[in-house]
Image (tube, coloured by chain):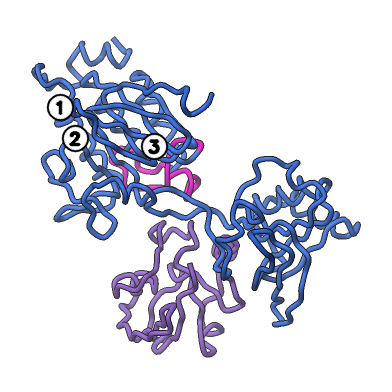
Chain colours: A purple, B blue
Amino acid sequence: MKIIAKDREGKETVIEGRDGWTIMEMLRDAGLPITAECGGACACATCHVYIDDGWYEKLVPPSEGETDMLDMALAVQPNSRLSCQLTCSEELDGIKLTLAPE
Amino acid sequence: MSEQAKTAIETDVAIIGAGPIGLFAVFELGLLDLKAHLVDILDRPGGQCTELYPEKPIYDIPGLPIVTGQELVDRLMEQIKPFGATFHFGEMASGLEKLADGRWKLKTDTGTEIVAPVIVVAAGGGSFVPKRPPIKGIEAYEGTSVHYAVRKMESFRGKNVLIAGGGDSALDWTLNLAPIAKSLTLVHHRDGFRAAQHSVNRMRELVAQGKIKFHVASVKSLHGEGGQLAGVTLLGHDKTEWHQEADALLPFFGLTIKLGPIAEFGINLHENLIPVDTARFESQTPGIFAIGDINSYTGKLKLILSGFHEAALMAQAAFHICRPNEKLRFQYTTSSSNLQKKLGVA
């Protein structure tokens, strides 16, 4: 599956996602500037992304823990998610997202 | 006490960071009779363990099949108790200079000075600092109209206060400042809160009574002059924008980690990490060591258990710097009555 990720300057990068890995891990491995300081424990809200172009509805809805943690994220929008809570799968092939400001 | 009145503290080792690795370093140093002072910007020990995931279970600490971040820190505090380390909480390590006698002087932002032959950087990713909302020009208002903490409630008396956020800090200060402020408005991105339910209930009562306002909105821009805020533009989720008078903005979005002043200490850094050798865990500057998440070397893994190992080897090297004329006697806690005395068990 492919992830089409836009950084904060609008530059688009196409990343090959590994099945079962989180999108946060793929963004980090691709060298995109995502802090993810808790390492994927849904405890810091620094892997915040906006899900673009209708992909938000196709995702598994956020858990209560993720919704709570988003309260600590900056510039939250209705299409905000924490990328450490999104797992790569073929259904998400072509997903578009933008890194939220830090 | 004024900053000038503080006299420099002399000790063996100054540790920057009281996270799990800084704490365990006290233990390894203590077995070798080396005394330590620790500096941490947070107001309690534990670093990321207690700040980010106090309730989350950790499964990869040898010998502890499951332990939460808070429990691990509590146990480390118990383990190092016999060594009587001194903690300087709520202070940021802000400067480091080399003295003529070869020792180091570590300064903090509150004026504490610690003189020691060995400095140990166990700072993880750096200092925890408040998250700054991405609002253009917000820096110009910080300290005058934009505050990330409340030091004196009285300073908000008669002001139009705007609070942003949905966690416990946002709700607690909403409730505390409501009777003091001229007006108080809370904005959050959703009509739901991470904060304690009784605080949320109380906030909703105040809204129902017309004493405060709550909007599902975010702060889009700030308006004012010379650092004094006059108003803000709020953006609702339906994309409507409106102006609101505000003298003070209090954003509460928790903390994030920034490397901070360590970058200016003259220690060689590579991608915000301190390269070390793997025999001593010393930086390229003799006498300055780096252990835990802040260091880098071939094969480095950012695991708590790796940091514990690094602390043990660092302590051996630190001993030779602090006690150049003494012979290091390597002993086991299981069999050495000498070590057991130090631990207070014999």
* Same chain for the residues under marks 2 and 1 in the image: yes
Q: Which label sits in the foreground, 2 or 3?
A: 2
Q: Is residue B315 left or right of residue A14?
A: left
User: Residue A15: x and y, percent?
Assistant: 32, 82
What residue is drawn where x is 20% and y is 30%?
Answer: B315
| Label drawn at residue B18 | 3
The subunit carrying tag 2 is B
User: How far is mark 2 from mark 1, CA to CA?
Assistant: 7 Å
Earlier residue among tags 3 and 1? 3
Figure quadrant of the N terminus of chain B: top right
Amino acid type of the residue that numbered disc 3 sits on in the rendered structure? Ala
Instruction: Specify the segment rendered in magenta.
Output: B43-67
Secondary structure beneath dot 3 equals loop
Using the image, determine if residue B336 lies above or below residue A40.
above
Q: Nearer the viewer, residue B31 or A20?
A: B31
The answer to which image quadrant residue A5 occupies is bottom left
Q: CA distance from mark 3 to mark 1?
A: 22 Å
Residue B266 lies left or right of residue B236; in this view the side is left
Amino acid at the residue labelled 1? Ile
Q: Are marks 2 and 1 in contact (CB under 8 Å)?
A: yes
Q: Which residue is mark 2?
A: B287
Is B193 or A62 nearer to us in this picture?
Answer: B193
| Quadrant location of the C terminus of chain B in the rendered image | top left
Q: Is residue B239 magenta?
A: no
Q: Is residue B190 above or below residue B128?
A: below
